[in-house]
Amino acid sequence: MKENLLHVTPLPPARNGIADYASILLDNVQAHTNSLVLSDTVGAVAPRGIRVVALEAAEPKHFKGRLPVYQIGNNWQHTEMLRMALKRPGLVVLHDLHLFYLYESLGLNSGEMTDLASRSNPFVSHAFATRLSAKATTPKLPYMLANMTADLVSASKRILVHSRYARNLIERHLGEVVADRVDVVPHFAIPSTPRDRDQTRRRLGVDSDRFLIVTAGFATKAKQLDMLAQALAPLVRQDRRYLWIHAGSAGDEYYNLASMLKEYPEVSAVTRITGYLSESALDDHLAAADLLINLRFPSVGESSGSLARALTSGVCALVTDTGGYSEYPSDAVLKLGLLDTHRTLGALIKVIADNDDLRTKVGLNARAYAETRLSMDSYIDGFMTAVTRAKAAKTVEPRRADAVVSDWVGPLEQLGSAFNLFGAGERSEVDFVRNPSSREPGIYVRRRT
């Protein structure tokens, strides 16, 4: 018997990777479900046979007999979906583990933000949470420490995440009882129509002798594009074969790739920024690429749709060995160490550019991994298991600060020692330790005793 689901999600034409994700999921889950969609996307388009109702027109009858499935990401396009998820519990597909910006979009006052920050991470003091809510902290620090997930997790019947890293983060901050309601289902590899590489490159105006590096998505500081520019600067001075295409938006007022590249004129001269691309146009760029670079610092438990697309297309990819990216097999993606510098990155790019056999081998392994572990059939099996569990689930309260027995905070990845994480009158010095026993990879930090 088919499950009755109510999907609450953005949809195309929203310029939101989660909208594309939801559309693909809806199309592939039809054999197992009777689906209705609530969406506040203007002109929302769902796969054929699936009805869409405007979110603002939602009525009790739309929920009757249906399990809500919420697609939640860390941006304003999910604001009303978050409000609904907090009121009407269901299965939450959590695409970002840090929801600071999303909760800001609710218009909470500073006291409410402080309270949520404190409850979301019992390892930080109330004083620090207060500075965080006032944005009186260093910009790299807040969104790693205060994930702001406590209310959403406690209100949900079940949580689906895409990596063990994400589940472990929830367990560390909110407790084992909560983590028992979290299912790990890796992001599906998004299939694309096979393309002739040479023809695609000609259509994109990429000469056959150029070594094409592609980065993708909305440009942000966390994607380490500055580091890539630093790495490419000496390479392009010596060898003009390198071409960098950023297949996505240049960013916004907080970070802008085009502005950053003005500091590296030689790199800017061999770089193109496409702006937002359709799925088909993104697939063109991945098919033409010699190397996809998908770096993250800090990683906040996010997954990458462009990386999933690259793997299924057999593209050689380079990722940062952190967060959920550490879980990809080392023969299917190449990995840059968390503490490696732009010099290491530049040397690695040159090795990859000079070694056709290496790129071919990694690409073949990537495709094999995508067709098995990341297949749509595998994803649907995991998703439907989460649906079954959510229907039978009861909500629970997350662990409170007085139940914390460990002084570990992390992985925080290169925070530095200038931050007082533990309240007034206590020392701010911290110790850094790589891979403490029984923890996932990363750099952890704890208070010195």
Image: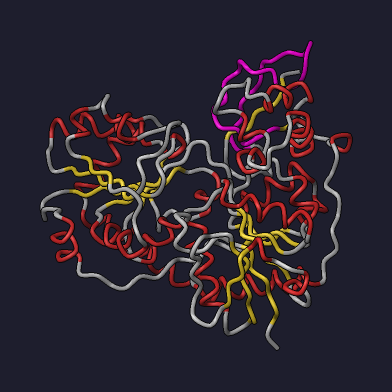
Residue 207: x, y in percent?
11, 53
Side of 325 relative to 409 (left or right): left
Q: Which residue lies furthest to the right in this view?
A: 402
Q: In this view, does 446 lie to the left or right of 352?
A: right
Specify whether 368 is left or right of 439. Answer: left
Residue nearest the viewer, comparing 89 with 126:
89
Q: Does the magenta stretch include residue 412?
A: yes
Drawn side of residue 69 relative to residue 217, left or right: right
Is residue 329 visible in the rendered structure shown here?
Answer: no
Q: Which colour scheme is used?
A: secondary structure
Let me know if residue 136 is in the magenta part.
Answer: no
- Residue drawn at (36%, 32%), measured in percent from left and top? 227
Q: State whether residue 424 is above or below residue 439.
A: above
Taking depth in this image into account, of 143 and 235 the one nearest to the observer is: 143
Point out the stretch of residues depicted in magenta.
Answer: 409-435
Numbered disc total = 0
Q: Nearer the viewer, residue 210 or 8?
A: 8
* Residue furthest front as drawn: 57
Residue 285's image quarter?
bottom left
Q: Quadrant of residue 365?
A: bottom left
Percent coordinates x, y for residue 133 in the rendering: 69, 28
The foreground one among 418 and 99 is: 99
Residue 162 visible in this rendered orientation of the protein: yes
**Most distant residue in the top direction:** 425
Vertical side of 45 occupied by 243: above or below: above
Q: Which residue is drawn at 51% across and 63% down?
A: 11
Prevailing secondary structure of the magenta residues: loop
Query: What's the residue at 32%, 48% (across, down)?
Result: 275
Residue 415 position in % (x across, y down): 57, 25
- Quarter of the picture holding the C terminus: top right
